[in-house]
Every structure is written in structure tokens, then in C-alpha cells.
Amino acid sequence: FNQVFKAHRWVIRTSIAADEEGAPGAFRASSDLLRAVDALMQCSLLVNADLSTEAILRRIMEEARTLLGAEAASVFLLDVEREELCSRVNSTSGEIRISTAAGGAGHVART
């Protein structure tokens, strides 16, 4: 996985970063853009990795948390039968349940 990621990272960074003279077809990329591209690429590679769904969601959550500079993050899945949002992938290491009748997250889940 890391070998594939490093190879793809090198190709993308090479294609979006300009050289000192500003080579034609290239442009200067900010470090934020490169960090975002790295995170998105790693997430797309994770989806195709041979990992459990929970492990993939955890890695994607951590990439998003780091990219956004957030202190905490959660991934919620909808439990239709119980009408709740459920998160076992979060920064608390516990399970979080939210009714779909409560708050903004519940509203989004209902609509």
C-alpha cells in the first residue's frame, strides 16, 4: 500500500508543482493543496485496500480530521430500524448514537 501511495504521490506532486522557471502547463501549488491532494489520494487508495470497512472508515476519518485541523471527528451510519445515527468510528473510541429526530445531524439524516 505505501509503495503505491508513494508512487502516486510523486506523480501528482510532479504534475502540479512548477519548477523554478514556471514550466509551461505547471503551476505553483500551495502546501495546503498538496496536503489535500495527498489526503484524497490516500483515501481513494484505502477504499481499494484489503481492509475491513471499519478500518477504512477510521483511516478516512483520521485523514479528514488532520486535513481540516479538527480536534475530533466521527463517522455516522444510519440505523434505519432504530431511526438513529450510529458511530463506532470516532475520536472517543466508544459508540455514539443520535436520534434522527434530534439536532442538525438528525435533520440531515431525515432529508
Image (tube, helix red, strand yellow):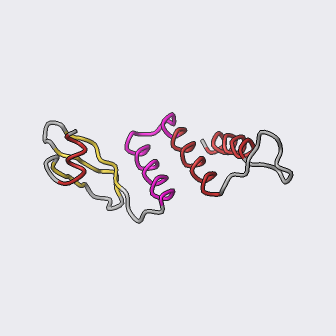
Is 69 colored magenta in this rendering?
no
- Is the residue 102 above or below the residue 56 in the image? below
Q: Residue furthest top?
A: 48
- Is the residue 8 above or below the residue 62 in the image? above
Which corner quadrant of the image does residue 79 belong to? top left
Of the pair 12 and 5, the residue shown nearer to us: 12
Q: Position of residue 84 (x, y in %)?
A: 17, 45
Q: Is residue 97 left or right of residue 71?
A: left
Q: Residue furthest right?
A: 21
Q: Is residue 36 left or right of residue 26?
A: left
- Residue ID at (73%, 47%): 27
- Residue ID at (40%, 45%): 57
Q: Position of residue 75 (x, y in %)?
A: 34, 49
Is 50 colored magenta in this rendering?
yes
How many marks overall? 0
- Is the residue 76 above or below the residue 45 in the image? below
Question: Which residues fall within the magenta stretch?
Answer: 46-68
Which corner quadrant of the image does residue 96 belong to? bottom left
The quadrant of the image that shows the C terminus is top left
- Residue ID at (20%, 48%): 106
Q: Position of residue 5 (x, y in %)?
A: 63, 43
Predominant secondary structure, magenta span? helix
Q: Position of residue 99 (x, y in %)?
A: 15, 49
